[in-house]
Image (spheres, coloured by chain):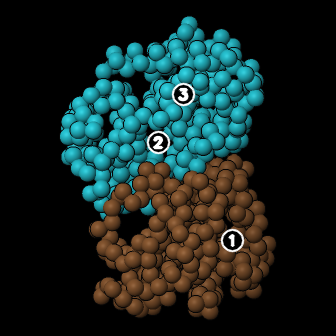
Chain colours: A brown, B cyan
């Protein structure tokens, strides 16, 4: 992580931040965060990321101390990011990498890191998904719809990257990614009530309505239906789309091409949304 | 909270601690904590609290960076607590209040605060429980068995204090407390697989095997059975036992007396365990 960060719009050094300014975030995970791409200095889909953080704060008005609303305005955050990049010679105003915005205890913290080293290989080769964490979530479980600092459940499962299902054996998501499968002539992703995180890349794909000629639809997705999938990718705001060449035991050679199309569409849209 | 704390056994000021030493605890809730009574300088049931923290670290060896084992030995923690109390004139070696031990990012943090202002009233008058959070947990959900820094679900429900049930409408626990009901001639508490936190006061009551002449048993507790309860209390390591004079709509006047007996038994045992 870069040592240049911002707190409430003010550029600071990471090593100077005090734990006492973030106690509820630390002790209880009482806060939210979001992770986004920065391409040549441009934070991607920032308005959408901030809207999700605001809606999470609105959903838990007493459990998390919200920052002053002005601190989460798009222009204010964009300016804070710009100041950080400019202040840090190792990043610079045309930095490309990952931005993270965390909100807790009335504060807005922005941090930066390079893209994960394996990102290119993930795009080129995809990632096999062979595990299932059955009944990981229950239907309509509400905290899953919010990207909270209490992210331990997902964090602990990250190395294995299992498909997370609910008590009715319906697919929910992956730890830190949404799932899309080509099925019955559509590109299917589980509904928020599965539950899953309303991921930003997921929302953009749904808004585009079609990818590679396939209609994008939100639909309850029984785990058993994965055996009929023709292709699969997962999405998140950093990798955008990663092909799944093997899904719970079945080879899906078309996945890499589908993921590439989804990625290209997301990249084009990111540039347009600015 | 007191400004005197310890990190890895060294007395420090809370305001001097840096966020950068606890990043995984903050960003992902990747850590564990435990809260315990300190009576006249004596941390209560400390060995049990530390054993639970160690078992949580063992259960998630890759997701949480564990501290050096010596830092969690009972003698080491006892000595760290003693040093803090002695160093802080406002507390002193015979401090009575709440201690908290949090573990993340390879560190052990101990903090102190007074008893909550409402504790005496809680003991005197008990606390009505009228809400149910249905299906809050799923059976055998494993993170619930560990007191993690990712405590947001429970933290967000704390003001309402609903009874948390699983997908089969069985009682699990309260946010931050275990539940005991007098039923069919026994004092019944749900099993860990409900799931619930293996609370320290709960473990001690189970180890005592009987309270006020009632055998203490772990048993699946259907929510519907609460309508047959003759008395009820909830337990945690700070309040020990709090009577529930009204449980989901029914008056239970015997609860206060039962809670008082449980509290007295826990206090006696605390002194004995040292």
The quadrant where residue A50 appears: bottom right
Subunit bearing disc 1: A
Q: With respect to residue B199, does A138 lie above or below?
A: below
Answer yes or no: are tags 1 and 3 on the same subunit.
no
Answer yes or no: are tags 2 and 3 on the same subunit.
yes
Between the C-alphas of marks 2 and 3, the distance is 26 Å
Q: Residues within 10 Å of mark 2 (few under 14, many from 20)?
A: many
> Residue A163 in the image: x percent, y percent?
60, 59
Q: Residues within 10 Å of mark 3 (few under 14, many from 20)?
A: few
> Residue B193 in the image: x percent, y percent?
58, 34
Which image quarter holds the C terminus of chain A?
Answer: bottom right
Q: With respect to residue B142, does A29 lie above or below?
A: below
Farthest-out residue, top: B213
Residue B213 relative to residue A215: left or right: left
Q: Between B218 and B74, which is closer to the camera in this rendering?
A: B74
What residue lies at 30% left-to-right and 31% top-to-bottom? B95
The quadrant where residue B200 appears: top left
The residue singled out by tag 2 in the image is B147
């Amino acid at each position: 992580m870069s040592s240049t960060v911002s707190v409430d719009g003010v550029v600071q050094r990471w090593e100077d931040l005090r734990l006492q300014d973030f106690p509820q975030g630390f002790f209880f995970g009482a806060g939210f965060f979001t992770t986004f791409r920065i391409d040549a200095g441009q934070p991607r889909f920032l308005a959408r990321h901030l809207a999700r953080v605001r809606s999470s704060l609105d959903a838990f008005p007493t459990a998390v101390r919200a920052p002053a609303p002005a601190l989460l305005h798009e222009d204010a955050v964009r300016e804070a990011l710009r100041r950080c990049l400019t202040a840090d010679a190792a990043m610079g105003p045309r930095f490309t990498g990952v931005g993270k915005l965390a909100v807790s205890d009335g504060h807005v913290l922005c941090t930066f890191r390079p893209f994960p080293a394996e990102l290119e290989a993930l795009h080129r080769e995809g990632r096999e998904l062979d595990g299932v964490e059955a009944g990981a979530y229950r239907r309509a479980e509400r905290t899953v719809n919010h990207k909270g600092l209490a992210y331990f459940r997902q964090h602990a499962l990250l190395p294995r990257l299992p498909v997370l299902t609910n008590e009715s054996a319906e697919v929910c998501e992956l730890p830190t990614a949404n799932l899309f499968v080509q099925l019955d002539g559509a590109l299917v992703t589980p509904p928020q009530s599965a539950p899953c995180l309303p991921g930003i890349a997921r929302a953009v794909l749904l808004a585009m309505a079609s990818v590679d000629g396939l209609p994008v639809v939100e639909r309850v997705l029984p785990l058993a239906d994965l055996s009929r999938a023709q292709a699969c990718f997962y999405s998140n705001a950093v990798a955008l789309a990663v092909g799944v060449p093997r899904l719970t035991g079945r080879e899906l050679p078309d996945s890499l091409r589908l993921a590439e199309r989804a990625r290209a569409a997301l990249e084009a849209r990111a540039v347009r949304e600015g």
